[in-house]
């Protein structure tokens, strides 16, 4: 689909439907996109749940033998097929050789996670030496903040989003208190403008310009969990550093989702979990990044002896296995190719949402959807956050009955994340049809 | 074997061999102990490697079909048999239901580790509310030290062993530096007396008495990794607290090994890993303990959303509702793949008690000691003969299951000859072996076989030199 590169997804959909002689909302468009999707075979590397196996499926209204419509990779990625085999290899090694597993086999436990660092580094645009796989995200954020957040009398603030993911908020709050400072003075939170839901890049940069001299660390998410907004990490990094701040990102929703260039952008530090777009399973092995420019200067506070000094202990082999299985699939392609598909896939979803669920002045009682996530593909990842004009709980339940897996944020938001690694354009089309049915079912009650 | 309770293992061995009419070093003694071991069936719950599968086995001199002699549970415990099944259950659930696994099934991922807390609490003598399963040991030690180590001008020291496990040493050092202090002044290290290898309890207590006013935290291991010494945790806790110190223990080598009573002893905090005597696999889920007396007074320094009250945690309000006690120290959801092996292991512990395990262990290690002394004591009549000095205290109450053996010859060749013959144990160059007969799955015959093999290994080494 290279002939479409550079075009806005809306335009791509228009051209394709035009050449097919059908409506943009026709399933033929989805079929066309799938046939021409160079990455469609990657789906085979994952285990897609069947409708019948989902807890809330209503088999009287949906075919249990079909694959479900899984648009929840932003919450928990699907299981890579090789996971089981790799885990069994390590269980066998443990059973057969006991303690020798630390040094023997294809995944010597004493350094197994080190072997995945180059694959992970590729995904986030870092050098291998800048990445460590370890712990959980929040632990890593704390380890990094202990080293990078060194407040002085004048430069004591941490800048983050007003609605940061709770764990980040609590982490930053506690880091500030640990220094004997008051979050009320040292926690600088960026809110959207009145009536808006996302942050304008210009406003972020302006805040940094205005307050930068008193900011010690800028710590934003790469992709905002609630709105799906992708921040301009390059510009924010540059602006922050120009004012003498350290700049770090929680890339939980960005890693494996969007193209990251942590090294080239000069990002000071970053951390992310691996169970979302990196598909390593609930509580999977997290990661940390420290730019190589700091390798001799940043005092690693809670030692052990770059980012290697931040490591505290041997990492669990059982968590290395699913992560290896997943990163090997990423290694069959590139973040660039995944992103190209993702922009079109999410643009296609957006197109259909707008087609069917825009507010209609002629039908004021009809439920409609407002997309919270920025419309500019460069300012979002694969997720769209949909704000409904009706309470979401019943809609969500009707979707679940029909084999859709997505995320609900009450009172009225759904987060839908068509993931380029394993979702198809037909998944998106099926979702839209199902959403129509779900809304109709709600109205019927 | 209750008729022997209270007797020193040496005496038990003597009586049994006497009643059997054989030498104390006869395999009949081992067979007798095994037949009368109420816990021998627990071995069936673990996967014991076969000699042929070990990397260094020499099948020309040993039968590959035999079970190996695995005396390395102090380094990595054996795999509980139910591990695979539990892991498969969670892999199936993930494959079949995706994100729903967080709330569905027998191990909902969002709180699976909470379901193991009462089993773990039993093992360490704590209340369920005092235990959290999370992270790795060193992470937990740091989280606890950040809350308990609050140095002042006068009270700024941390007391630990001179040869603490490296991770503990580095952790304490960095905690001191984090406060802007100098380890040289604030890291108080206890060394054994000249010519001794273990610490005398009296010396520890004396150090606390003398320096206690300047000590903020006493942080020792429960069982010392190198010497195998079991510290008098009750006395140390009392002494430290009497001087106004907080007292914590790294129980990595103690949990699942010796009887712990963290709650009753009033220990302030503790942490441990689970891949040694708790058999949860390399890098398994670690644990932390905070005494309930602190539940409203000691605040976690570093917060994450898992410390938030479960009822409202997912409302994403960004207003922390901190759980009391150790639960407030939680940072994130723990990996389900690590919960599975730990569950499998703790279920085996739950078939017995630490008291019963300890009773067997005292006899098992005493039996090992007896044979070591019988065959490998220094012999003035044969000065060239290799001999073994046991570093670990001889008092069963001052050790766990491990014996650290100092050889009169370099250990490497001995170790290699042992490996060729299917022994799995731990070598500490230049001349030490650590042997840990684990009550959960080792037998008295394992110990006897080890001794025979050690004789062969030493003879072979002699022959090859």
Image (spheres, coloured by chain):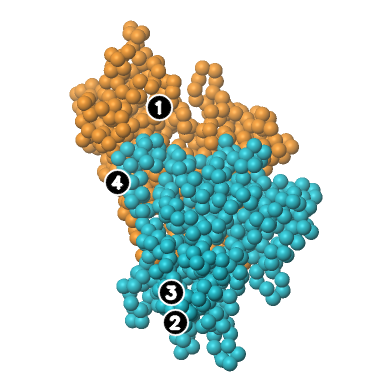
Chain colours: A cyan, B orange
Q: Secondary structure at mark 1?
A: strand
Cα–Cα gap, marks 1 and 2: 76 Å
User: Which chain letter matches label 4?
Assistant: B
Q: Are marks 2 and 3 in contact (CB under 8 Å)?
A: no
- Label of residue B427 in the image: 1
4 or 3: mark nearer the eye: 3
Observer-nearest of A293 and B360: A293
Observer-nearest of A420 and A279: A420
In the image, taking residue A261 as reference, residue B61 lies left or right, namely: left
Query: Percent x, y for residue B330?
Result: 55, 54
- Label of residue B45 in the image: 4
Question: What residue is shown at x 27% (from left), y 20% (from top)?
Answer: B456
Cα–Cα gap, marks 2 and 3: 14 Å
Q: Residues within 10 Å of mark 3 (few under 14, many from 20)?
A: many
The residue wearing badge 3 is: A30
Query: Percent x, y for residue B284?
Result: 44, 46
Cα–Cα gap, marks 4 and 3: 53 Å
């Amino acid at each position: 689909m290279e002939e479409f590169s550079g075009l806005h997804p809306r335009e791509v959909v228009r051209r394709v439907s035009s050449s097919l002689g059908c409506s943009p909302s026709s399933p033929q468009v989805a079929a066309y996109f799938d046939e021409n999707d160079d990455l469609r075979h990657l789906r085979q590397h994952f285990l897609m749940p069947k409708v019948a196996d989902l807890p809330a499926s209503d088999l009287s209204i949906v075919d249990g033998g079909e694959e479900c419509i899984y648009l929840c990779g932003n919450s928990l990625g699907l299981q890579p097929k090789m996971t089981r085999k790799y885990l069994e290899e390590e269980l066998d090694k443990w059973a057969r050789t006991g303690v020798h597993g630390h040094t023997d086999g294809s995944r010597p436990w004493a350094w197994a996670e080190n072997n995945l660092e180059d694959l992970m580094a590729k995904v986030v645009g870092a050098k291998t030496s800048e990445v460590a796989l370890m712990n959980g995200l929040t632990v890593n954020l704390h380890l990094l903040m202990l080293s990078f957040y060194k407040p002085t009398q004048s430069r004591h603030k941490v800048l983050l989003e007003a609605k940061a993911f709770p764990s980040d908020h609590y982490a930053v709050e506690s880091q500030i208190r640990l220094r004997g400072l008051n979050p009320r003075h040292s926690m600088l939170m960026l809110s959207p403008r009145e009536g808006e839901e996302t942050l304008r890049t210009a406003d972020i940069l302006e805040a940094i310009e205005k307050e930068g001299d008193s900011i010690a660390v800028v710590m934003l998410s790469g992709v905002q969990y609630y709105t799906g907004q992708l921040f301009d990490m390059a510009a924010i990094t540059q602006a922050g550093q120009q004012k003498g701040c350290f700049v770090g990102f929680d890339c939980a929703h960005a890693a494996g989702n969007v193209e990251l260039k942590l090294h080239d952008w000069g990002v000071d530090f970053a951390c992310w979990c691996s169970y979302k777009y990196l598909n390593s399973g609930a509580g999977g092995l997290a990661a940390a990044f420290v730019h190589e420019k700091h390798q001799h200067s940043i005092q690693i506070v809670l030692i052990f002896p770059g980012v290697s000094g931040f490591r505290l202990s041997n990492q669990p082999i059982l968590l290395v296995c699913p992560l290896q299985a997943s990163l090997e699939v990423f290694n069959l392609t590139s973040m660039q190719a995944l992103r190209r598909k993702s922009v079109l896939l999410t643009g296609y979803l957006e197109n259909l949402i707008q087609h069917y669920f825009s507010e209609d002045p002629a039908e004021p009682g009809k439920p409609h959807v407002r997309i919270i996530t920025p419309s500019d593909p460069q300012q979002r990842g694969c997720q769209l956050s949909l704000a409904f004009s009706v309470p979401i709980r019943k809609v969500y339940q009707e979707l679940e009955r029909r084999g859709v897996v997505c995320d609900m944020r009450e009172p009225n938001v759904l987060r839908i994340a068509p993931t380029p690694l394993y979702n198809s354009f037909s998944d998106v089309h099926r979702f839209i049809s199902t959403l129509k049915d779900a809304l109709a079912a709600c109205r019927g009650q």
